[in-house]
Image (cartoon, rainbow, N blue to C red):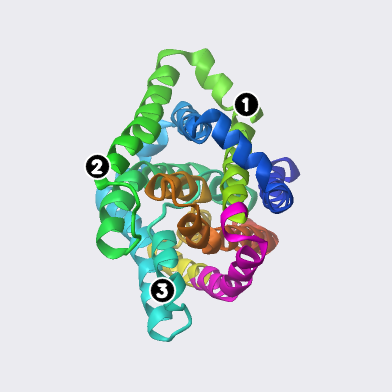
Amino acid sequence: MMRVFTNGQVYAILLVISFVLASQKPEWGIHLKLMSSGLLTDGLIVLIFLIQGLRLKTASLREVWSKPASGIAFQLSILLVPICWVILGSMLDLIKEEVENSFLYIAILPTTISTCIVYTHAAGGDSDYSLGHATISNLLAPIVITFLGSQIIDIGMVTSFGFVITKILWCVLLPSLLGWLISRSSASVRLLAIHDFFTMLPLFSISFIVFLTFCEGFHTLGTEVVWKSLKFTFLPCLGFVIALHVSGWFLSGMWSRERNIRISQFFCLSQKSLAMGMPLAIMLFAGSSASLIKFLMPLFWVHFVQLLTGAMLLGYLSRWVHKEAITQ
């Protein structure tokens, strides 16, 4: 369990280091972006989705879609329940107008893949079930975020809609497809893709993107503005994560009576993916660091809080699943 748990801890540490380093040395990231003419960030995004394609397991997808009606309903729950929470929070003035768009963006993000599966496995849930639904959620994400996001979120894109579609095609969809085709053509590649190196490489890539993004943000907005934004968004993010966990627990109880399946559903419903949200937000806000930083603040808080909340629940959930196994 400790080995599985380490990836999440490393990810959190890397993000904290990236943020602190960007606040102290923003000029480093500025120089790197200037030297690479912006291609460095695009290259890292391509690498992230290429590796996701390499690690894609079609067997899990077939298992999920063996019951298409329940599969579609569950995917809609991952998408619609968080949107309902954001609307309710806005109506009650718990989510302020300044960050409402950010929370709507988080709501339409897919569930995490790595954290969801790690926590499901550690708690005694069905990892294959989590993998199948998390994979489908992430495969649909670029389409959902681009088209649905443009309808319900006033994101004020500084790039044209056509440019965003083109960039998602080249940086997200094609690398994912290429990675999947490569893994299908070679058994040795499939074995290599599950190595710890290919698990950690996307985490380092995302952390580096975070560093570059916040370097530009600190340079443009100033340290005081960025820290104020962090303080302003913490409590709404905490409430949002708690709401997702509460609704995820009750909905999973409605979907299944089997405890291992319920654990899998719970983590799918209560997690939102920084790994997908960050690259797509960069494409939407290309060239506008001020808008991007303010927009992403809630996403970072949500990621950290859901990581900690899930970790704190692991012991209880594991004992709960184990108790059912003993009584059977």
Crowding at dot 3, Cα within 10 Å, few <14 / some 14-19 / many 20+, comes out as: many
Residue 174 position in % (x across, y down): 35, 28
> For the point 67% across and 47% down, which residue is it?
26
Residue 33 position in % (x across, y down): 56, 36
Q: Is residue 96 left or right of residue 73?
A: right
Q: CA distance from mark 3 to mark 2?
A: 31 Å
- Of residues 46 and 38, which is closer to you in this image? 38
Residue 183: mark: none
As helix, strand or loop, the secondary structure at mark 2 comes to helix
Q: Quadrant of residue 10?
A: top right
> For the point 28% across and 64% down, which residue is it?
152
Range of magenta residues? 219-243
**Residue 276 appears anywhere in the view:** yes
Which residue is denoted by mark 2 in the rendering? 162
Mark 3 or mark 1, earlier in chain = 3
The amino acid sitting under disc 1 is: His
Which residue is denoted by mark 3 in the rendering? 85
Which residue is denoted by mark 1 in the rendering? 195
